[in-house]
Image (cartoon, rainbow, N blue to C red):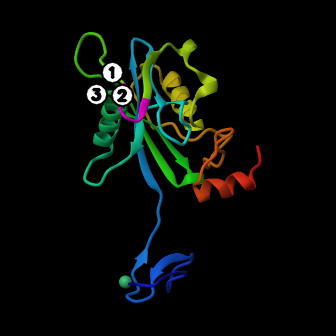
Amino acid sequence: MSRFSRLVPDGDHRERVSCLDCGHVFYENPKPVVGAVVSHEGRVLLCRRAIEPRRGYWTLPAGYMELGETAEEGARREVQEEAGAEIVTDGILALFSISRIGQIQIIYRARFAGAGQPVYSAGEESLEVGLFDWSDIPWTELAFPSVRWALDAWADAGGDPLRAPYGNPEADPRGDVPPPGLHSDNPTMTRQEEARPQ
Ligand SMILES: [Zn+2]
């Protein structure tokens, strides 16, 4: 059984979990999240979360990348898993930093693959899935601030060719601000929530 400790490795500048027996350092780095704003005739695809955090709230299909896939493949897989839809991606719509929870979010603009009426259905992690007109989006029931940011970016870009990705809004340049009322066991979140009462 190896012994582990948090210490600053030689030549480093912050504490890492290290193995005291062999010196292996377990680096903890931000994880990429990939997702998509999928639209059809001006309506956007949203999923109501079946899992915590933020169960019951609406989100874009998105999730952590898996090893061995590209960002675009990951976005397509997440849309398939959570919304039962096959998509074609246009390109990267937005790139958000959520430093509060160590995420970088890569959000694609996408449409449904194939002709005819869009096909979608709730996957395991979704309670329901729907296409929403802009005015029908449940704005007060969105799961995370970045869902709003991505929807705003999508609306702002319209149907134009995509240019440089949209980034964090000026109001939250580092992605520090949690969704209102979020409860989580994630120690990073808890610490930040304590530091930043709503
Ligand atoms: Zn070791």
Task: Report the Cα–Cα distance between label 1 and label 3.
Answer: 14 Å
Name the quadrant containing residue 82: top left
Q: Earlier in the sequence, mark 2 or mark 1?
A: 2
The residue to which callout 1 is attached is 120
The residue to which callout 2 is attached is 83
Query: Which residue is found at the position 60% from the left and 36% from the top?
Result: 145
Residue ranking furthest to the left: 114
Q: Looking at this view, is 75 or 154 the one in front? A: 75
Circles 2 and 1: CB atoms closer than 8 Å: yes
* x, y percent for residue 149: 56, 33
Give the position of the C terminus as an image quadrant.
Answer: top right
- Magenta span: predominant SS is loop
Total number of numbered discs in the rendering: 3
Residue ranking furthest to the bottom: 21
- From the viewer's perspective, tell me whether residue 184 is left or right of residue 2: right
Q: Does the magenta segment cover residue 125?
A: yes
Q: Looking at this view, is 10 or 120 the one in front? A: 120
Task: Report the Cα–Cα distance between label 2 and label 1.
Answer: 6 Å
